[in-house]
Image (spheres, rainbow, N blue to C red):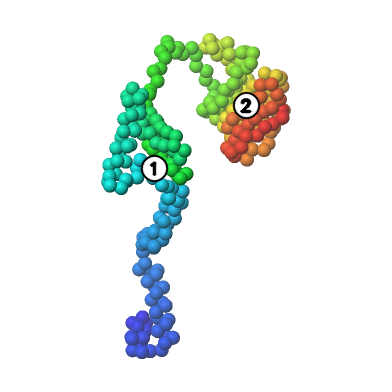
Amino acid sequence: GWSMATMSVQGGGDGVLRELVLATSKRSYDMFAEDHAAEPAPDVESKRVSMAAKIASEYSSVRDVPLPDVLKPKAGGGGGEARGSATSSTAQDSSGAGGASSALVLRNADGQEERARPSSNALVVKQGLGGGVLALSGRRQPPKVPTPTWHAPWKLKSVVSGHLGWVRAIAFDPGNKWFVTGAADRTLKIWDLAKCSAGAAGGLKLTLTGHISTIRGIAVSDRTTYLFSCAEDKMVKCWDLEQNKVVRHYHGHLSGVYSLALHPTLDLLVTAGRDSVARGWDI
């Protein structure tokens, strides 16, 4: 059928049949012969326009900045006088400072000297003539590595184990009687500080459950008997340690809560979460 239709088209057949064969051929080519996975050929004109827009955006503010007098070529001197003035200015500055400085001396629009410090690694931006901006790169200095202060090696006293997941948070009782830990096993554990420090058995005093995801932050109030915890389940809980249960929930975070802190003098709790906000709560 295909060869017959092609022959009829070549032989000057019906125009409708010709259009149908051409349309079918184009669809067949697009479906079977075209390499759709290959990257399209780059458009030279689009690339040129994009590059021109980037250059105009980055350098439009310094396009018409005039050169300082020390860098302008002088008539008859071929630029030698400008180089000589810059060299003499630098040499005079070096000799006046006892050879301790070799910075390039520039003058701003008011005629005042400005010096680019050679000890700086960053670009030094200076005010040029006519309100222009001139950027100078300072001399790079090797980084200074601080010498650590020696101390006696730390000595491991005890290892406290009991959690079934990574321990993510820890907080101490203001009275130095116990401390609390929170882990990825979704539990809070309260430990006896004296027994755990001595490595004695029976250091675990209490286990609190209620979170449904990894606990990320713990805070113990020194004004009340409350313990606060936050977790990746978007929950902030207030625990009453006299009843050993949750007495208040703080709802509002839209994602996991990763940190919290108590105000030292006010009844104020601040939490920070993965939803890019910090929220303050009236306890």
Q: Secondary structure at mark 2?
A: strand
Instruction: List x then y, in percent, for residue 77.
Output: 27, 44
What residue does disc 1 label? Answer: 68
What residue does disc 2 label? Answer: 261
Q: Is residue 112 above or below residue 24?
A: above
Say left or right for 274 vs 32.
right
The numbered mark, 1 or 2, whose residue comes first in the sequence reads 1
How many neighbours does mark 2 have within 10 angstroms: few (below 14), some (14-19), or many (20 or more)?
A: some
Residue type, mark 1 in image: Pro
Taking the spot 58% from the left edge, 32% from the top edge, the residue there is 258
Taking the spot 67% from the left edge, 38% from the top edge, the residue there is 252
Q: Are marks 1 and 2 in contact (CB under 8 Å)?
A: no
Instruction: List x then y, in percent, for residue 211.
Output: 62, 32
Residue type, mark 2 in image: Ala
Q: Residue furthest front?
A: 76
Q: Secondary structure at mark 1?
A: loop
Q: Is residue 219 above or below residue 45?
A: above
Instruction: List x then y, in percent, for residue 167.
Output: 53, 26
Taking the spot 41% from the left edge, 13% from the top edge, the residue there is 150
